[in-house]
Image: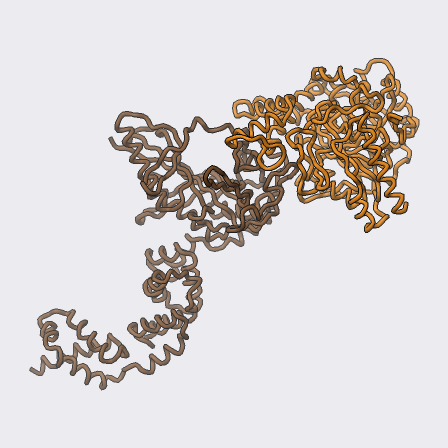
Chain colours: A orange, B brown
Amino acid sequence: MNYEEIRKKAYAAYNECSRLQEYLNASASLIDPESQLAELEQLSCDLPLYGEPVAVKDNVCTKIADTTASSGILQGFRPVYDAHITTLLHDAGAVMVAKTSMDELAMGGTNLSAFTGAVNNPYDLNRVSGGSSGGSAALAAAGAVRFAIGSDTGDSVRKPASYCGVIGVKPTYGRISRYGVIPYASSLDTVGYFTLNVKDAAKMLKVLAGRDDRDMTSSYEPVPDYSVNLNTDLTGKKIAVFGNVYDALEPGEVKESLDRVIDGLRKKGAAIEFVRMDPVLAESCMAVYFIISNCEASSNHSNLDGTRFGLQKEADSFTQIMMKSRTEGFSHFVRKKLLIGSYGLYEDNREEIFVKAQKVRRLIVEEYHRMCEGYDALIAPACPHGAPLKSEAENAPLSDRIEDNHMILTNFSGDPSMSVPMGFENGMPVGLLISAKAFDEAGMFRVAAEVEEITGFKDTVREVGK
Amino acid sequence: MKYRTTVGVEIHCELRTETKMFSSAPVSFHKVPNSMVNEIDLALPGTLPSVNKKAVEYALAACMALDMEIDPVVRFDRKNYYYPDLPKGYQITQQFHPVGKNGHVFLQIDGIKKEIRIERLHMEEDTAQMFHKGNHTYIDYNRAGIPLIEIVSAPEMSSGNEAAAYVEILRNTLYYLGVSDAKMEEGSLRCDINVSVRPWDSEKLGVKTEIKNLNSISNIRKAVDYEVSRQIEILDAGKEVEPVTLRFEEVSGKTVFMRRKEESVDYRYFPEPNIPAIELDPEWIGLIRANLPELPEQRRVRYLREYGLSEYEAGVLVQDKELSDYFDKMCAHTKSYKTASKYLLTGVLGYMNAGKIRPEDLKMKPADFALLCDAVTDKTVYSSQAKSILTEILEGADAKNLIQSANKGKVSDIGELAETVKQVIGENPEAVKDYKSGKDRAIGYLTGKMMKKTGGMADPAVISRLIKEEIDKSEREW
């Protein structure tokens, strides 16, 4: 592609994100690509993402655009530095066209809690996009961009991917540097992304993965070329079906499409077996997640105090400035979570709440690994249903059922996991979750490529408002 | 009633690394406020800490110097509280697994050796600095993130004097290690002191108070002594000591109320999730141990055993590292250790004190000084001559020439001297009479007169011998 075509493509994406705003409300801010295009002219067109428009979740620090994490307390916050992945995208030749809406500070799964309002699902504007990376998922699903960055702490890439019918990848914890990504819960946070096909997913990971000395949890593990060996058959591969989740499925479209995938994988040479984990540990996932994520978040967000950046309310003393800024800057929902997190860390509670949650996390991970032992991949429906109506989701109580929470398991364990489009339920997309062993993203993509072939869902976009 | 005093000390010491504990911003002092700062020090959203390896090395060296057990797995925790000087809203520290445990130092007070155990040493980061001007508070983040080690003693000191000696020994040890400037007056070494008193026969410790941020060794002594007397007064009056935090007011010499202990916050400690546990390579630990520099105590013992210095001399030299470094440089050129230390601690130290000169700024080269000491020892020059030579070489003059010309001008001809002796005896009949009546110091007086006449160019020992001989001879002649 020549530079003029690149230019056209970038502006087309930028304009499309802008047009979609009315329907999806997916962008926190739009980025005029002009300055990036000027730089691109100097760069080699051999770059892996040369001229490729990307949308980036608004918790990724960018010098060229405000970074608010969809929270009132970060209104107008313009980072003075770029996140590691921002630099990598730039160096790969990508053009950022939008910062995308998310659940406030990534603390949610519906994208209803963004400071700029809910993100709508491209397949039904009355339904949620899922969260917390809802804006990125929606823009990819609507075809505005083919690559979008998200982050995944409990299922925040994979759930919106499932709801919006796109590919959502959560690589191994430590595979991609978190430096410059506003955290939710540091021990669970993983940079992830959305694409429309498996080949692009493989390509994107090659761009983003690798050690960064500024993130001590980032891995030295070599980064392979994930694109080779895609679409080789699965003979000799052992794939496990997550029995606890399968058993919980009601008869209907989701179960039918899962069965079709299982059947297809068998035909491609894979040995399929059903596995199950201890149901008590399985159903402890949400409670453990709730405690660990909110305890860590309560500390992680202590820097949002209204003194150095973001929203600052006037008051007579530091304490007052901080209290007023935090009270006004955070939504009620976030304040509640931070309060719960703080409570779990108090000296009198720490052993009973936080430390116990960490211990149970370890037990869950041990049990999960026991279940997966000997298999190349584990599959399950990402969500038991398609995206709910916004009105339903708003008041839904927390569920502790495994079929609603099983994606958390790979955040606990750090293993890679992704959602690929599997089918529909009442016209709403549903994804298949594929999880693999730590740093075996290549193996995960291999299974995903076969699923893509079985389902035929590849480069599927939903046009909106046309 | 008789009371016992219990004192415990917490020291915070800034490490002299190139960059900060968890960021690559430079560690530098006396710079334009907020110029030595990056996004990590300001805790901008999305930033992450990276552990400074040099800081870990320095902390390990400190552990070794204090004879501590080293935890081979380095782990960090978060201490959460809100304060304007704490940008992240938490400090990264080592609450649950300090890098060092169970060490000790020995105090030497009035010739008595006392062991003080050290409970823990851990790494953490410094806060920003706040300045209050008028109605405004200014924050300088240059200090934010500078590596600190905190060293906590067991409550085993029993007076202000012991607390002062303890801090002095730690200060000096850290300074010798080269891990810190350890300057109390500049805040690179700060200390908080816990004090309690209890009746002599009581098993249970009394209620303790904490004195914050003492900025000199002498203030430690004064603050503890004052606080002990204050607590005793309270107990004598039948009242109870309140567990408060105090600060020392230099002007009045009193400890004054800062805040109540019950106002202290719950720090919500938990393991720092952004820093994985770091397993220390035993080989690296071994390397650090092998490269430890000589520590004050080792140097003191060397001075006593190898150089034959007195306890006093060794003590004074070792207390000032640069002075004793200078001494060691001299000793590379001379074996006249005693003479060297004598001259260094009298003439040279006097000169330095008068001119406020530090040993490292002396114009006199250690080798020149050594030459002079040798000349004195082998009597090439007389001590009387040495004094004036020293005065000149302190100003940078070449010692060799001065010693040579002094040696040339020396009056060593006994015959020549005998004439002058007769002259002096003739001129001072009173002194001769005094000597004859048994007052030996009259010889000193006469020797002085002789030295004046010879311009200091004669050996005083020879002179006094000649004088004695001359008087004794004349007596016999009578």
Where residue B430 sits: x, y (%)? 10, 74
Q: Tell me: B227 left or right of A392.
A: left
Where residue B63 sits: x, y (%)? 50, 45
Q: Quadrant of residue B327?
A: bottom left
Where residue B95 sits: x, y (%)? 53, 34
Q: Tell me: A246 left or right of A174.
A: right
Residue, far left: B478
Question: Which residue is found at the position 47% from the left and 37% from the top?
Answer: B135
Which quarter of the rendered picture does the N terminus of chain A lie within? top right
Q: Tell me: B474 left or right of B131.
A: left
Q: Tell me: A250 left or right of B223.
A: right
Vertical comparison of B458 with A122: above or below = below
Vertical comparison of B423 with A246: above or below = below
Q: How many numbered dots are placed on residues in this image?
A: 0
Q: Choose between A383 and B76: the one closer to the eye.
A: A383
Can the viewer see residue B288?
A: yes
Q: Choose between A298 and A105: the one closer to the eye.
A: A105
Q: Quadrant of residue A25?
A: top right
Which quarter of the rendered picture does the C terminus of chain A lie within? top right
Where residue B297 sits: x, y (%)? 41, 52
Can the viewer see residue A368?
A: no
Vertical comparison of A14 with B420: above or below = above
